Image: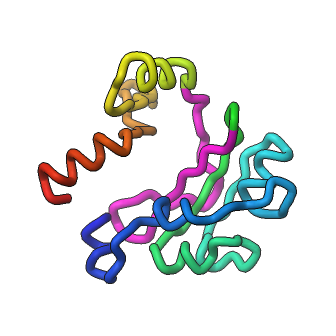
Amino acid sequence: RRKALRAKGLTTDFADASKYLTISADGDALVSTCARHGTPTFIANAAATQTFCRQALAGEYGIESIVCKPVKGGVLEFGTSSGPETATWPDMPPCPDLPKDEIKRALEDLGAAYVIFWQLRGDYYEVTAEFATPDHERAIRDRYGE
């Protein structure tokens, strides 16, 4: 994905570009609405949704679908991008409740560099969520040039 973004002349990704924005807690933004009502929200085509405040960014970075899910202390946002390497969501996908206390303990108390959530789907476990600390991501980029 990063290679595709670099080929377009972009040096950051959608998440990094979004870090520079602030969203009013009482506004009509996807994140605000999700947090205020305590229910997940979904946009099937972020780049074509005129009411989405990051519509232009979504188009620039090739973001398609976005889900926002309320969690303790904020909102978890995740989504898909255009291209064969990602899923297509015509409707909101099911999102499991992540084990937040265990994740926090692993990262903050135990010093873990990353967490992976393996979800049971039928008879197999699949990775459905992952997180790497910024320091770990930086070390991987420095080591492997990615």
Which residue is at the front of the view, 138 or 78? 138
Left or right? Give the position of 38 relative to 88.
right
Query: Relative to residue 78, is residue 124 depicted above or below?
Result: above
Q: Give the x, y percent position of residue 27.
A: 84, 61
Q: Is residue 129 above or below residue 24?
A: above
Give the magenta-colored segment's residue range. 74-98
Q: Looking at the rendering, in which quadrant would you find the C terminus?
A: bottom left
Q: Determine whether, in the image, residue 48 is placed left or right of residue 5.
A: right
Foreground of the two, 118 or 124: 118
Task: Relative to 48, say whether 65 is above or below.
Answer: above
* Picture residue at 44% right of the left edge, 38% below the top: 128
Q: Position of residue 126 (x, y in %)?
A: 37, 34
The overriding secondary structure of the stretch rendered in magenta is loop
Question: Is 81 a magenta residue?
Answer: yes
| Point 56% across, 25% down: residue | 100
The quarter of the picture where residue 119 lies is top left
Residue 41: percent from left, percent from top: 72, 52
- Classify residue 42 by image quadrant: bottom right
Quadrant location of residue 95? top right
How far from the left and from the top, in percent, is residue 18? 55, 64
Q: Residue at x 78, y 54 (%)?
A: 32
Q: Quadrant of the N terminus?
A: bottom left
The residue nearer to you, when weighing 7 against 117, is 7
Task: Please name the colour scheme applied to the rendered image.
Answer: rainbow
Q: Is residue 93 above or below residue 6?
A: above
The residue under the point 36% across, 27% down is: 124
Residue 50 forms part of the magenta stretch: no
